[in-house]
Image: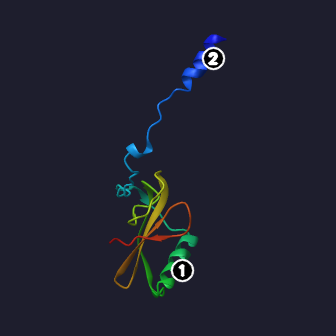
Amino acid sequence: MVGAAAVLLLSGCVMVEDVNDRPPLQTTSSLPSATPTAGTDAVPSPMQWDAILSDLAARGVSTDDVRLVSSRTVTWNDGSLGCPKPGSTYTQALVLGMQVIVAVAEVQYDYRFGRSVTPVLCERA
């Protein structure tokens, strides 16, 4: 019993660090996404194609003559889908998805899909 009391008393004697002695919390910006793992050629689903057309229309781009340039399955290295935006944070896990590049006139649009049918237009700075 005396031993147990001594252990309890000694365990209560811990050194408390003064929080003012610690450096301030620092954050870092997210690292650029590494090159994604390319898969095979793939065809966008009708839902994905409709989502791309809707996005283009919302941007004021005519959808009368949209041409598929390329489409492939991709395993993205993180939730940015290979197209990180400055100041944003993303899940740090592999994301199975697709890259679909379309052209309207001479302008190409690089769309990325992750786990949903909502496209992300990759606009490089």
Q: Find the distance from the CA under tag 2 to the CA under tag 1.
A: 72 Å
The image shows residue 29 at horizontal and vertical percentages of 37, 58
Q: Earlier in the sequence, mark 2 or mark 1?
A: 2
Residue under circle 2?
Answer: 5
Question: Quadrant where the C terminus lies?
Answer: bottom left
In this view, 88 is above or below 108: above
SS at badge 1 = helix
Q: How many marks?
A: 2
State the image quarter where residue 45 is shown.
Answer: bottom right
Disc 2 marks a residue whose amino acid type is Ala
Query: Horizontally, is 26 left or right of 13 in the view?
Result: left
Q: Depth check: 59 or 2 in front?
A: 2
Q: Nearer the viewer, residue 7 or 42?
A: 7
Give the percent coordinates (x, y) of residue 4.
63, 15
Tell me the element at label 2: helix
- The residue at which mark 1 appears reads as 54
Q: Nearer the viewer, mark 2 or mark 1?
A: 2
Q: Amino acid at mark 1?
A: Ser
Q: Nearer the viewer, residue 111 or 22?
A: 22
Expressed as whole percent of the image width and height from the top left, the position of residue 58 reads: 51, 83
Q: Quadrant location of the N terminus?
A: top right
- In the image as oriented, which residue stretches furthest toward the right? 1
As drawn, is 54 to the left or to the right of 25?
right
Question: Residue 89: percent from the left, percent from the top?
Answer: 45, 59
User: Crowding at label 1, few (<14), some or many (≥20) Cα neighbours within 10 Å?
Assistant: some
Residue drawn at x 38%, y 73% is 123
In the picture, the disc for residue 26 is none
